[in-house]
């Protein structure tokens, strides 16, 4: 009986440790990249949902999103330079890409005293 109790306690303890360990591992895992359409949102930046818009025109889609966060310009530039090429975007100028008749641009803008990142796609 004592052996059964000891085995039960050991198994219970191992299960609790496994559950707690998996929760801790999940909490420490990197945040999954968020996407707006086919554009990645840099981790650490948040979409300002009330400011953006998207619609289709006869010439093609027009999309503008605004992102907020503490990311500095070199970090944002490095992230999007690395992210856009695998998606088929070709950098034509600083923070300006072209793909299949569209142009994507990133600009740092100020709004109500806050620094935001504006990502826009428009027809060429």
Image: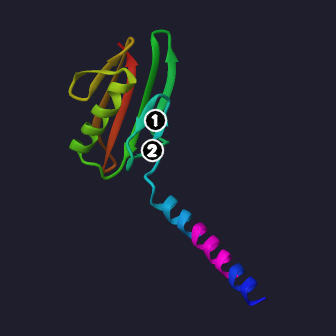
Q: Is residue 28 above or below residue 119?
A: below
As drawn, the label of residue 70 is none
Q: Give the structural element (helix, strand or loop) at label 1.
A: loop
Query: If the image is split into quadrants, where does the N terminus sit?
Result: bottom right
* Residue 58 point in image, percent of width and height: 50, 9
Which quadrant is the C terminus positioned in?
A: top left
Residue nearest the viewer, comparing 54 with 81: 81
Residue shown at 53%/67% (left/top)?
A: 21
Q: How many marks?
A: 2
Question: Is residue 76 part of the magenta span, yes or no?
Answer: no
Report the magenta stretch's main SS. Answer: helix
Taking 55 as reference, is 74 left or right?
left
Near-viewer residue (61 or 51): 61
Residue 13 position, x and y percent, is: 63, 77
Q: Nearer the viewer, residue 63 or 23?
A: 23
Alpha carbon separation for disc pair 1 and 2: 7 Å
- Image position of 123 (left or right of 107): right
- The image's mark for residue 52 is 1
Q: Secondary structure at mark 2?
A: loop
- At x 45%, y 10%, the residue is 59
| 17 in the magenta segment | yes
| Image quarter of residue 90 | top left
Q: Residues within 10 Å of mark 2 (few under 14, many from 20)?
A: some
- Which colour style is shown? rainbow
| Magenta extent | 9-19
Residue 111, how many percent across, how many down?
33, 45
Which is more toward the observer, 33 or 6? 6
Do residues under tags 1 and 2 come within 8 Å of each other at their CB atoms?
yes
Q: Which residue is mark 2?
A: 48
């Amino acid at each position: 009986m004592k052996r059964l109790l000891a085995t039960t306690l050991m198994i219970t303890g191992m299960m609790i440790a496994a559950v707690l360990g998996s929760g801790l591992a999940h909490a420490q895992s990197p945040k999954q990249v968020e996407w707006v359409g086919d554009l990645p949102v840099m981790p650490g930046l948040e979409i300002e949902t009330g400011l953006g818009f998207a619609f289709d025109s006869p010439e093609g889609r027009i999309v503008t999103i605004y992102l907020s966060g503490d990311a500095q310009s070199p970090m944002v530039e490095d992230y999007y330079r690395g992210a856009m090429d695998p998606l088929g975007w070709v950098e034509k100028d600083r923070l300006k890409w072209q793909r299949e008749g569209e142009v994507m641009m990133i600009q740092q803008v100020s709004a109500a005293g806050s620094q935001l990142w504006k990502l826009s796609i428009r027809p060429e």
